[in-house]
Amino acid sequence: MELADPSGSYAVLIGSSTFASDKLEDLPAVKNNISALGELLEDSTVWGLPRGHCIRVTDPASAAEVLDVIHDTARRTEDTLLIYYAGHGLTHPDIDGLLLTLPSSDPDRPYTTVNFDEIRREILNAGRNVNKVVILDCCYSGQAITGGMSGPVEMAEQARIAGSYLLTASAATRLAQAPPGEPYTAFTGELVHLLNGGTPDGGDVLEVGKIYEHLHSELRAKGRPLPQQRLSNAGRTLAFARNRYSVRLQDRTTARETPEDRIPERLRAALRNQPRAIIAHATRLREGEDPADTALADELLSLAAQLRPAQEVAALVWLLRGGTRTQDADIVLLAASGRRAQDIVELVDALHATDNSEDVDQLLGARAECAGDEVAAVVKALRSAQRVTETEWLMNAAIDRLRTTEQILDLAGALWSAEMGADADRVLKAATTSSLEETARLADALLVMGQKEKAFELYRQSAAVVSRRPTADIVRVLQAMDQADHPQAADELLRETVRATTTPPQVQDFCEVLWSMGMESRAQSVLRWSATGLTTADTIALGDSLRAAGHEPAVLYLLRQAASLGPIERISEFIDALREAGRPVDGNRLLTDVADRPIADVAELWCWLEQHGRTRDRDRLLNATAARSPGDRAALLQALHARGHAHDDLLTPIALAPTEELLSSLHTLREHHHHHAAAGLLRHLARVDATTAAQRLADFEAVPDDGASMEALILRIYLRQGRGDDSTLSLDQKDKEAIRAHVTGHRLQQRVDAMSALCAAGLDAYVEPALHGDTSLMRTRPMLECLTALHQASLTGCAHALIRDTARWKTAESFRALIRTLDDADLGAYAEYARTLSKGQEPVPTTEPPPPARPSAPPSTPLKTSRWNPFRAQS
């Protein structure tokens, strides 16, 4: 391939390094880029452009200056036109393509930049037979970040130029880099290095495709952004630089020094001897009087390890081990570890032949300490020789020593270059860094290299470090996680960042960046999680700041989250803050939001508002609960009842609801053993609207359900009571029989539930007598089960009534046995009550109906009686 004719070629090198806008980071390395590239392109050993054919435009004042230079140069070019740009790249949502920045550019004013489409049109002014080479060193990012060139870069199809070669520093969605402390940007630095030193496999001239391959390999090995290329007409090849490596300039070393070149004259003859003779010569040197001879002996062994055939080196090690010359054997193995990869494989085989397996491990362990490309070469050679065990040992040893990002990427890059991608991936998965900071650096590099899964895993491990980075850095990582559909990793990083974001200004700044990147949902997460960590005062201050910045929806969202996640008493403070800010509607909305929270929270706030005299807010909250289900409203009724509060505005809509809803509410209350609340609801219905209550009574009686029949019973009694107090309750015989049916006519738990409901309704005096004469409780076990259930339901009066009834038909001996059983069943209070009965300390009520007749005790078991015997058989 021929080099482009320098006499008919031109290069225009454009660079923007300083910027007036504080949204664009200065790039001092760009000036070095322009200077170094210009010198190389003019150097006769690279391209040799004549004076005036390499035009440098550093920090251009306007777009016109850039376009004029390209326009004039394109018209003069006869062979090859090279256009180079370094600086920030930008895009605009309404403008397609790439925008190149100038020192005066403002990211918010795209007209202050140079549209690459305009540059493309000027390049087309060159003749059809002119080769066009465009090199762009800019990147894709949202804003300037420390150590990086930033700004979105869209390399769309219109970037194509007929008959041209386009080389970019990074992909459309990747960052280019200007590493701090380095003289050049990452991409141009590698290009300068290539043009200055050449490459062994490049031939006499560097074809553009070869330049791309070299840069791609080197940048990938270093974990930096990968370049992209586009050749519009693949049938043509371009070359604008000689390969200095093949030229071998006089000021460079013409040949690499070999171990043979370093052999001291005194050792040349010894090195030609057999292993035993070499060892003997080294021994004589050590025994000599000249201290320098000891170092010469070490050098003799090292040179033998590097120069002698593999079998002889293995024999040398074997002889030294046998002669207990362990230290000398270690010297030989260390020196041999630096040999060519194929030599290492042969030496491994030779060491195995001499049964020196441990020395194989030592040899490979020493090789594992070498540079990545040297390790990769041996790994590949061992695998080709099917030495599986040794390959695994070397890989493990090499991985174990990796601690820094540079070491990890050096080895992984070398393995990739050697076409061992699986091994490279293994290095990335298994490598352990020395610190969380190093882990984060490695994650950065892997993200740029497209190793997203591993990068995100490392970001999660180092989230505490990443969360302390500049906001733009964090957002860049979050954006990559979201784009790759890794929301969990993004959530973890975001949570860690929020924990480190402790002041209102920090929270707002973080949200501003997220909003500017179109990440509204992430900004909402920041506000939501911050609401739980900020104090009430800080939350209100943040809301004021967001409002001042025009983020009204965010203010309401923040306060809603703070109110929903924080203590109940904070809600009133947020409501007051909104009202004081002239937003009473939002304040009321925040209050009514509470109506959707758990019932316990609603009840707690309702009581707090009641206690502090905020009746209007209390009523607003109560009205908002009307949209909830009957079961929820019933649960709220019970919660308020348990706190000693009842409110007609809550009772009335439930009590006056349709029959089905009312029954559902009553069922919910009773299912949760809220019998007093259920009774209060029925009493309220009877007092507020007798007509509706009568209709509900008829509806209840028409439902073939025991629960509905009991509600009908209670409501009928309350309706008969009218508006009097509870002491005026009166029952007719039908009501008493209905009570007895509920108390005695069901399974045990249903009977206890019925007693609880009837007692809560104020019918204790009628429930307890209904227990007397219940034949199902004559045996000890059923009666004991009933007592236990009554005790658990806190129906002490009913339990006492049952014990009194039992005393009427139990014999003295069986009653004493019952007392012992009660003690054993942990019902000691009832056992004590039974003892008082047995001692005559409590008279048996005479108003209780007598139980049905029972057979008298047999004569063979006479009763032991005192002056008053409650166990005497009844006639």
Image (cartoon, grey):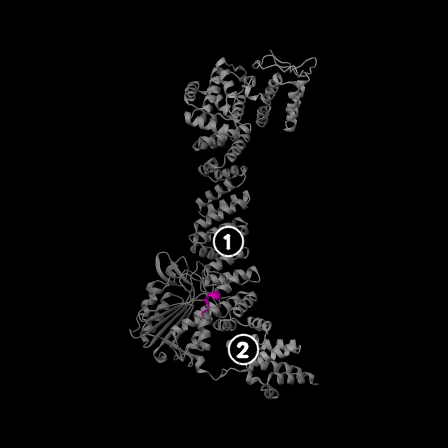
- Which residue: 61% across, 16% down? 808
Label 2 neighbour load within 10 Å: few <14, some 14-19, many 20+? some
The N terminus appears in which quarter of the rendering? Answer: bottom left
Q: Say which of 611 and 667 sits in front.
A: 667
Residue sitting at x 57%, y 62%: 434
Where, by quadrant of the figure, is residue 661 drawn?
Answer: top left
Q: Is residue 47 left or right of residue 578?
A: left
Q: Magenta residues, as a range?
A: 419-424
- Return the residue found at the far top: 875
- Asked where in the image residue 397 lies, by quadrant, the reply is bottom right
In the image, 312: left or right of 453? right
The tag on residue 493 is 1
Image quarter of the C terminus: top right
Give the main secondary structure of the magenta stretch: helix
State the mark number for residue 339: 2
Amino acid type for the residue under numbered disc 2: Arg
